[in-house]
Image (cartoon, rainbow, N blue to C red):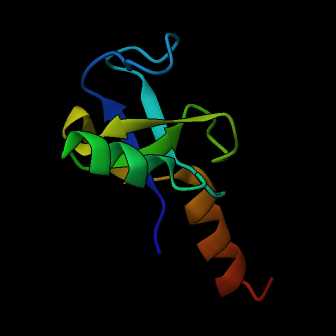
Amino acid sequence: MSYKMYKLLSDSKIDASAKAGMTAYDIRGYDYGLARDDTDITGIHHISVTLSDDGGYPSFTIPVSDLEVIGDAPFYTDMIAARKAGG
């Protein structure tokens, strides 16, 4: 699994501090089924993201259509580099 970095295309309806144009990251931990619940309830595919560049909590769900992938998350590229270096 690769962890991605996204640009928010709209303000979050869940996290008032998450505004359009900000960077969000795939969450590294569990979302305890929240994204699936939101997907099932709305019929719109959701994922869980965080504003923390280390992929940590807190997180919130957001429709995939409100995100633009802009690259791999920095913590993911650091993990890959560490594996290549034998760490």
Task: Say if 19 sits above or below 82 in the image.
Answer: above
Q: Where residue 73 appears, x then y in whole percent?
A: 51, 52
Q: Where residue 85 appears, x then y in whole percent?
A: 72, 84
Residue under the point 20% across and 44% down? 44
Q: Residue furthest front?
A: 41
Image quadrant assignment for residue 58: top right
Q: Residue furthest bottom?
A: 86
Instruction: State the count of labels.
Output: 0
Front one among 42 and 6: 42
Q: Where residue 74 appears, x then y in whole percent?
A: 57, 52
Front one among 65 and 69: 65
Task: Say if 67 sits above or below 47 in the image.
Answer: above
62 lies left or right of 2:
left
Residue under the point 57% across and 50% down? 27
Q: Residue furthest right?
A: 87
Q: Where residue 80 appears, x then y in whole percent?
A: 60, 75
77 lies left or right of 11:
right
Residue under the point 81% across and 82% down? 87
70 lies left or right of 27:
left
Image quadrant assignment for residue 56: top right
Residue under the point 56% across and 31% down? 51
Front one among 43 and 19: 43
